[in-house]
Image (spheres, grey):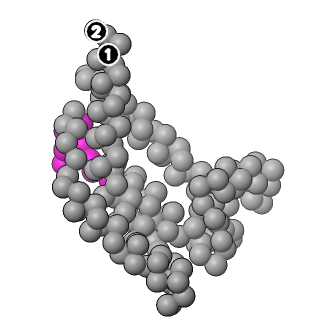
Amino acid sequence: MRKQYYFYYIIFFLSVLHYTGIFLAPYLFDINSLVSSFIYSIYALECHQMSSRSFFVFGHQMSVCARCFGIYTGWLIGLIIYPFVKKIDNFKTPNKWYLILALTPMGIDGTTQLIGLRESFNELRLITGLIAGFIGVFYILPVFLSTINDILKKMEG
C-alpha cells in the first residue's frame, strides 16, 4: 500500500477522534464533569461556543457551535467520500472557483450577521458549515498529502 494511504488513514482517524469529542463533552457532563469541562476547554480554543449558536445533545450544549459542527461534519463526510471520487495519490486540487463558490454562503451569512443586517439561525449555520467543510477536504487533503509525500521523498533520497 502506498504511504499516502497510511497518512490518509491517520487523518481520518484523528478526524473521527476530534468529531467524537464534540459529542463526548455533553455526554460526560453528568457523568464526570471534570473530564467534560476539560473537553469543552479544548474545543474552546477553536470555537466561541456561544450557547445561542449551538445545538444541544444529551441535555447539554455541544462542544462547538452549529457552524463549526457543520464544518466538522462536512469534513468527515468529505473524508469518507474522498477515496471513492479521487485517488489518494492525486495531489491536484480542484479549480479555486469551486472553493470560492462553496465558501460564499458562509461568508454572506457570517458577514450580514456581523454587520447587523440580520440574525442568522443555527440550521443555516449548520448548512453553510457543511458545504465549507465538505469542499475543504478536496483542497486541504491533497496539499497535506503532497507535502508529506515530498518530505518522505527527501528523507528517502
Q: Residue at x 42, y 38 (%)?
A: 11
Task: Examine the rendered structure and indicate whether residue 29 appears above or below residue 1.
Answer: below
Q: CA distance from mark 2 to mark 1?
A: 5 Å
User: Mark 1 sits on what residue?
Assistant: 154
Q: Looking at the picture, which amino acid does disc 2 mark?
A: Gly
Q: Crowding at label 2, few (<14), some or many (≥20) Cα neighbours within 10 Å?
A: few
Q: From where the camera sits, is residue 123 visible? A: no
Q: Residue at x 50, y 90 (%)?
A: 118
Task: Examine the rendered structure and indicate whether residue 2 appears above or below residue 65.
Answer: above
| Quadrant hosting residue 103 | bottom left
**Magenta highlight range:** 78-88
User: Mark 2 sits on what residue?
Assistant: 157
Task: Examine the rendered structure and indicate whether residue 155 appears above or below residue 51.
Answer: above
Q: Looking at the picture, which amino acid does disc 1 mark?
A: Lys
Image location (x, y in percent) of residue 123: 46, 78
Image-based side of 95 in relation to 6, left or right: left
